[in-house]
Image (spheres, rainbow, N blue to C red):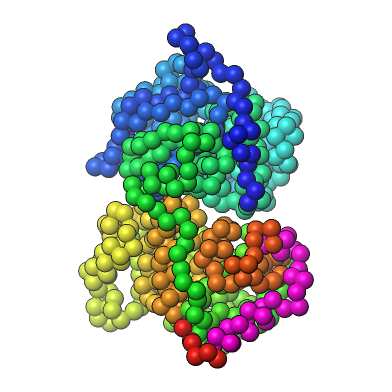
């Protein structure tokens, strides 16, 4: 990802001067505290954000970042503390008050009505009067102007449900700008974006900053912090631990400030020792309900003790590949796992796949990995609830035994808080992901399917998750990894396959490829070599001849 412009090129516009001299902060939070029952989410937090800057806020999942921003936007009311906007103490009891104060917020999970048009979403709650037609006409003109000024390329009359995730995010930004926001809060804005969409977002943010807008960027991605922000504040366990100029810090220092210890930013792993073929896919084809081909003759193989990473822009067949392998999708072609041919007609399901030794960490943990209203101990056994160790007798499950097993898994996977009875929705994103990973990895599968393993996850949890994936590989599992993060693909994978428009463009060795090479394949430039996959498979065969099967 090329990323936004470097800090050295930025020149913030002139700020308002205070009577005492110096610039007046666009935002000043003084002694903000907020508790939810016994949990202290924010503790005596003070921060100043200067106008015309991009100010990053980082911290582990559950550090209190989103709570603090929700207080600033009026979703929560602080137990103690003051909010000062442009030098004036400002009461923000609700989001309407925040909007009146010139604050807009773009949430990680968008607040849009899917079956409304872009313009209808933008004016929702900001209509000029009882008659909608004049409001819509005015908003349409203004949206076209804003979209042109900021290169957002959004059709005001398109239904939101027809837009890509990146374009939906632009609608959220346009909503805030339409309401004349001078302060923009973005909560994990790139968590659901492709690299190209993230690049475009940061170009938009640079333009907004240059025009004097103040931007608060909440993210766990240190590279984005280093490339996009002027100043960064670090939170840990509800407290503000440091605020530094971005140009005067480093990813290593920020990671340590976030976690409270040194963090490995690079994946440490030994060279793979591939064994026998575990997964064999031949001529796999999927056509959706509209008759559009989603997979077009995919061939691949994964051996015991290796990780095959699938790179590609989201929407190019990776999801369908995981769904077919996981038993959620009908397909044509052939799939073998440990030599057994799998049923692709739809008669098989995810549970039968598990019996075949396949574990699956889905791309979207909220919709396919967890039932958020259910407690952690129930989520821990989904898909495995028929296992003998969880049965008390023919009619009843051993709930006490399941809770005890969940407690042990929570301890091994460092789930915080380690409370099996807590509903899944009350865990941070990183800890939700750990619950899903614990459920799947604890079964020692022959094949692990894992989609977007660290989406929306902080740096400490990323380090932990990567270690667990490598440990499973070293124990002899075959792993299919899908991620839009090229750094993650390159650092974890033993081989890389690049997908475009439902086809595999080529295979690469992570040690010898780079982002430019992968980017060309991701853009549809087919591998010019005769058959890179055969070369890599030949190397594996030579390893077998030398006596190693992992």
Reply yes or no: does residue 533 show up in magenta: yes
Q: Nearer the viewer, residue 117 or 355?
A: 355
Does residue 129 appear left or right of residue 442 in this picture?
Answer: right
Does residue 219 appear left or right of residue 371 in this picture?
Answer: right
User: For the magenta stretch, what is the residue range?
Assistant: 518-544
| Quadrant of res 342 | bottom right
Residue 264 visible to the viewer: yes
Q: Residue at x 31, y 30 (%)?
A: 44
Q: Residue at x 46, y 55 (%)?
A: 265
Residue 81: percent from left, percent from top? 33, 25
Residue 277: percent from left, percent from top? 54, 85
Q: Residue at x 63, y 51 (%)?
A: 1
Prevailing secondary structure of the magenta residues? helix
Residue 305: percent from left, percent from top? 48, 78
Residue 182: percent from left, percent from top? 57, 25
Whether residue 50 is situated above or below residue 330 in the rendered picture: above
């Amino acid at each position: 990802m090329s990323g936004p412009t470097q800090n050295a090129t930025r020149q913030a516009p002139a700020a308002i001067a205070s009577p005492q001299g110096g610039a007046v902060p666009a935002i000043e939070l003084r002694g903000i505290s907020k508790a939810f029952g016994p949990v202290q989410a924010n503790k005596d937090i003070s921060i100043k954000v200067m106008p015309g800057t991009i100010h990053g806020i980082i911290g582990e999942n559950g550090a209190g970042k989103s709570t603090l921003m929700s207080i600033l936007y009026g979703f929560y009311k602080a137990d103690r503390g003051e909010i000062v906007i442009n030098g004036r103490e400002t009461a923000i009891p609700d989001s309407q008050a925040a909007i009146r104060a010139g604050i807009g917020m773009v949430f990680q999970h968008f607040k849009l009505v899917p079956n409304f048009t872009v313009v209808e979403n933008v004016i929702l709650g900001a209509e000029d009067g009882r008659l909608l037609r004049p409001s819509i006409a005015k908003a349409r003109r203004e949206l076209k102007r804003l979209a042109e000024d900021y290169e957002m390329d959004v059709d005001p009359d398109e239904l939101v449900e027809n837009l890509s995730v990146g374009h939906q995010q632009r609608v959220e930004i346009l909503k805030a700008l339409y309401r004349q926001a001078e302060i923009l809060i973005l909560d994990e804005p790139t968590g659901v974006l492709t690299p190209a969409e993230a690049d475009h977002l940061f170009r938009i943010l640079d333009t907004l900053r240059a025009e004097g807008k103040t931007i608060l960027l909440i993210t766990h991605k240190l590279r984005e912090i280093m490339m996009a922000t002027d100043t960064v504040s670090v939170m840990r366990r509800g407290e503000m631990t440091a605020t530094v100029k971005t140009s005067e810090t480093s990813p290593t220092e920020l990671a340590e400030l976030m976690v409270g210890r040194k963090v490995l930013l690079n994946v440490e792993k030994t060279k793979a020792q591939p064994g026998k073929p575990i997964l064999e896919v031949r001529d796999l084809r999927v056509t959706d309900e509209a008759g559009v081909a989603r997979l077009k003759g995919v061939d691949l193989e994964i051996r015991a003790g290796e990780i095959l990473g699938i790179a590609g822009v989201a929407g190019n067949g990776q999801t369908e590949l995981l769904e077919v392998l996981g038993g959620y999708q009908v397909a044509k072609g052939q799939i073998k796992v440990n030599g057994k041919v799998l049923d692709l007609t739809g008669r098989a399901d995810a549970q039968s796949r598990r019996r075949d030794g396949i574990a699956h960490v889905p791309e979207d943990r909220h919709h396919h990995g967890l039932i958020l209203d259910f407690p952690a101990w129930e989520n821990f056994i989904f898909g495995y609830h028929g296992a003998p160790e969880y049965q008390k007798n023919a009619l009843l499950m051993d709930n006490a035994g399941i809770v005890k097993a969940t407690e042990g898994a929570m301890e091994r996977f460092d789930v915080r808080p380690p409370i099996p009875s807590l509903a899944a929705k009350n865990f941070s994103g990183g800890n939700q992901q750990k619950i899903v990973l614990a459920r799947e990895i604890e079964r020692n599968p022959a094949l692990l399917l894992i989609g977007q393993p660290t989406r929306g996850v902080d740096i400490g949890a990323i380090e932990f998750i990567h270690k667990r994936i490598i440990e499973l590989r070293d124990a002899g599992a075959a792993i299919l990894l899908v991620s839009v993060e090229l750094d993650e693909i390159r650092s974890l994978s033993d081989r890389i396959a690049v997908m475009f428009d439902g086809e595999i463009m080529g295979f690469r060795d992570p040690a010898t490829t780079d982002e430019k090479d992968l980017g060309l394949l991701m853009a549809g430039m087919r591998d010019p070599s005769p058959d890179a996959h055969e070369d890599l498979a030949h190397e594996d065969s030579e390893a077998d001849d030398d006596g190693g099967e992992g």
